[in-house]
Image: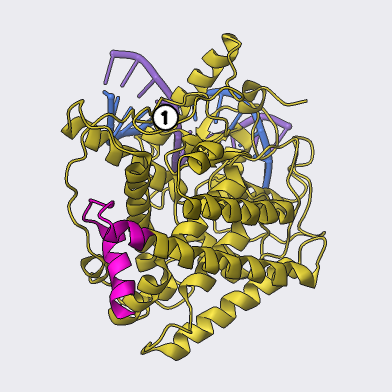
Chain colours: A yellow, B blue, C purple
Amino acid sequence: MELRPDDLEDMCPVCGDKVSGYHYGLLTCESCKGFFKRTVQNNKTYVCAEYQECRIDKTQRRRCPFCRFQKCLHVGMRLEAVRADRMRGGRNKFGPMYKRDRALKQQRKALFQRGGVRSESTPPLISSDWALTEGLYPVSILHSAPLPTLQSPFISLQPPSLSPLLTPISPAAPLHHNNPLSNWTLKSKPPSTSSPSSAAGLMSDPLNPSPCRYRTPQLVLQLQQEGPDELQLQEKVSAHFLKEKAAGGEQWTPTTFSLMCIMADQTLLHIVEWARTSTFLRRLRVSDQMKLLQSCWCNLLLLDVVCRQVLYGREGRLLLVTGQEIELSDISSSSCPIMAGLVLRGQELIRRLLIMQVDHAEFTCIRFLILFNPDVPQLEDHQFISSVQEQVEGALLEYTLSSPSHLLERFSHLLLCVSELRSLSALTDDYLYGKHLSGEMHCNNLLLEMLHAKHDQD
DNA sequence: ATAGCCTTGAGC
DNA sequence: GCTCAAGGCTAT
């Protein structure tokens, strides 16, 4: 029996109590709001007397502040919404997000009232017919950005380039620095991460908690904090499409392929931005940053797609970065054998990851394992890159072993999935380059630059 | 320390 | 001027 959305919406995702409004990033009850505020403002450190997996509900929430705070973080409460200067009143940067979230909930409610839950009847999104998929399923602010209807001519993009993106490099920050968590959790026991849907700012389902992991290594937690921010990405891409639409007229009918390219390109920009600001990559000189990114961009792009499907997607559909969905069968049937093969293998990979219930923390580690690839030729700071690889691998191993099943196999299965991803990425790369050579990618963008960087070396 | 209620103030 | 999410206050 599935819950209606509104049943969940007026329940605090931390303890299940009555929601009193948006607090620190999402709808919570008054008590969890206060608890979160006290904890962050006073740099509190808690210790769990049990196994860091205490159940948090309305009656027991006082019993273990450690687990309660972990849950606050897991469901997506934002540390940065607690003001350092304690200024009262006014609004913060989450305002627009709250507004959109409200609008989406309103929309969903209306759908339910009409009895028109369209989970089985979402029209296929093909070619220029990009319907507004208002009935999108995920119970999440992640998918709340308004979706543009695209009919606009494809105006030429500013050609973004990798090197200017990387050059304004900030001074190398020592590890465990600039992290809102680092001041005060280092002393406490390593907190846990559980639901795959939580760490990215999603609402967790308090009635149906996902499998609980615990003893999340500090490093993993820190990497998770660094993003990339899905919500921001979705907003960015949606805004980009709106801009395109506004700039153009009614004549342009983009193909599905060109729309995908734009999405890939925008996602790539976001990935580069994420990498650029990550504590680890910042410590490298720009030349190494470029080598790493040029070697793995396609892996990261695919990982982004795969991760989205595993954490939030639905079977048989491709959940796009904008929150829209495409029937996979539509892609397969309308594309060449290479693409259809890629889709099949991708589906199989996603199926495996779904069965394993790979969560956000693990995807985060994988992202870093892919980025910090010591096998990239001619790295200047090879030693540091190797050490990051080792540290992250160690943290991932520790994390997988701390899961209730604590199977060593899980770790090796994950690594197998990574190598499958790499192989898929190589095929995708070739496929795209072929498309480019045959003149089918008529946009000048980061995607193209990355394609060139790789193939010009070969 | 908790949690319900109160005050504040930027942005609409 | 109103809204509503911040921080503050205080009985428990």
Residue at left offset 70%, top offset 33%: A16
SS assignment for the magenta stretch, majority: helix
Going 60% across and 18% down the picture, which residue do you hit?
A: A117
Q: Is residue A430 above or below residue A29?
A: below
Q: How far across and down, in percent of the image, does residue A144 sit?
A: 45, 33
As drawn, A352 above or below A152: below
- Please state which amino acid type lies under the numbered disc 1: Arg
Residue A391 placement (x, y as % from top left): 58, 79
> Based on the displayed image, in which of its 4 quarters is residue A50 positioned?
bottom right
Q: In the rendering, at what x and y percent does residue A157 appear?
A: 19, 49
Which residue is more in the foreground, A178 or A432? A432
State the SS at label 1: helix
Q: As drawn, is A312 to the left or to the right of B11? A: right
Can you identify the residue that label 1 sits on? Answer: A100
Question: Does the magenta segment cover residue A3?
Answer: no
Q: Residue furthest top?
A: A114
In which quadrant of the rendered image does the C terminus of chain A lie? bottom left
Q: Which residues are magenta?
A: A432-458
Residue A290 visible in the shown view: yes
Foreground of the two, A54 or A187: A54
Q: Quadrant of the N terminus of chain A?
A: top right
Drawn side of residue A69 relative to residue A233, left or right: right
Q: Position of residue A437 (x, y in %)?
A: 28, 61
Q: Quadrant of residue A364?
A: bottom right
Q: Residues within 10 Å of mark 1 (few under 14, many from 20)?
A: some
Residue lying at 52% horizontally and 24% vertically, measured from the top left: A135
- In the image, taking residue A157 as reference, residue A415 lies left or right, namely right
Q: Does residue A359 appear in this view?
A: no
Q: Chain of mark 1?
A: A
